[in-house]
Image (cartoon, grey):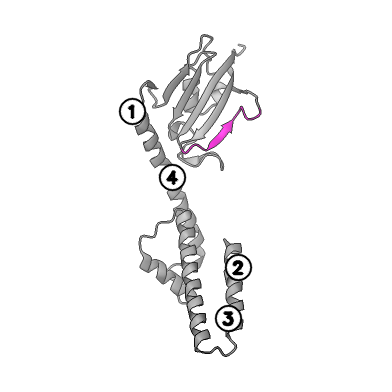
């Protein structure tokens, strides 16, 4: 954002220098029109940046007052040191709320889909293909092909991108996926819908899974490696 703003600022300085040379009435009018347009464009740019970052302008008057106070170097209504933490907390709240909205939309849509099974813990399952082999236990190791996506279609895991399968202990999967995989048989292909609370929850998973995100897994259970007792 800083780099984008620097260009119009540099142009503004250049124009100020050019127009400072005793402009006549026509030049003065052209200068005012240009500067007014530039100021308007800057306002649109700033507002677009806020909107693009999920900010809601519920009180335009207070937004303008904040800009005016800072521009005039007046006493601010909030401590300047608290501004960035306030914005960060608000953005975090927006992300949390967005996850909940996406989850509600996803699972309400699933209610209307025929053939979708619901487990007791709220995990939803769409069976693509039944398997005939062994079911894994919690302590077993499974070999499977997995594609995990968020509700908006963003992939956060894809074991097939390198044409390789994924091998993991069942008890190392997120809770919602654990229970579903333990119901699968070797050879099965399921689409598994995991509520956020049974996925990565409020913490999320780094930059790949935002907080409170429902998860969608396309799982093909290749084989089960029984734990040695």
Quadrant position of the N terminus in the picture:
bottom right
On the image, numbered disc 1 is attached to which residue? 112
Question: What is the span of residues highlighted in magenta in the rendered image?
Answer: 152-162
Considering the whole magenta stretch, tell me its main secondary structure. Answer: loop
On the image, numbered disc 4 is attached to which residue? 96
Residue 7: quarter of image: bottom right
Q: For the residue labelled by badge 1, is the local secondary structure a helix, a strand or a loop?
A: loop
Q: For the residue labelled by badge 3, is the local secondary structure a helix, a strand or a loop?
A: helix
**Which comes before the other along the chain, label 2 or label 1?**
2
**Which comes before the other along the chain, label 4 or label 2?**
2
**Which comes before the other along the chain, label 4 or label 1?**
4
Asked if labels 1 and 3 touch by Cβ distance under 8 angstroms, the answer is: no
- Tag shown at residue 16: 3
**Which comes before the other along the chain, label 3 or label 1?**
3
Asked if labels 1 and 2 touch by Cβ distance under 8 angstroms, the answer is: no
Q: Residue at x 34, y 28 (%)?
A: 111
């Amino acid at each position: 954002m800083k780099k984008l703003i620097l260009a119009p600022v540099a142009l503004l300085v250049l124009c100020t220098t050019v127009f400072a040379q005793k402009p006549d009435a026509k030049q003065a009018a052209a200068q005012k029109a240009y500067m007014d347009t530039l100021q308007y464009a800057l306002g649109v740019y700033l507002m677009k940046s806020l909107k693009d970052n999920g900010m809601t302008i519920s009180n335009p008057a207070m937004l303008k007052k904040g800009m005016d106070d800072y521009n005039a170097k007046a006493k601010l209504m909030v401590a300047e040191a608290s501004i960035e933490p306030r914005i960060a907390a608000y953005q975090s709240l927006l992300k949390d709320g967005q996850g909940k909205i996406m989850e509600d939309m996803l699972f309400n849509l699933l209610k209307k889909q025929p053939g979708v099974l619901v487990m007791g813990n709220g995990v939803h399952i769409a069976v693509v293909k039944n398997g005939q082999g062994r079911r894994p236990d919690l302590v077993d190791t499974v070999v499977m092909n997995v594609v995990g996506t968020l509700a908006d279609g963003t992939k956060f895991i894809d074991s097939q991108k390198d044409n390789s399968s994924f091998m993991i202990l069942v008890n190392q999967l997120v809770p919602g996926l654990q229970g579903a995989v333990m119901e699968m048989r070797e050879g099965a292909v399921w689409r598994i819908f995991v509520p956020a609370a049974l996925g990565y929850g409020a913490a999320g998973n780094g930059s790949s899974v935002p907080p409170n995100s429902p998860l969608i897994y396309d799982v093909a259970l290749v084989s089960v490696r029984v734990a040695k007792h």
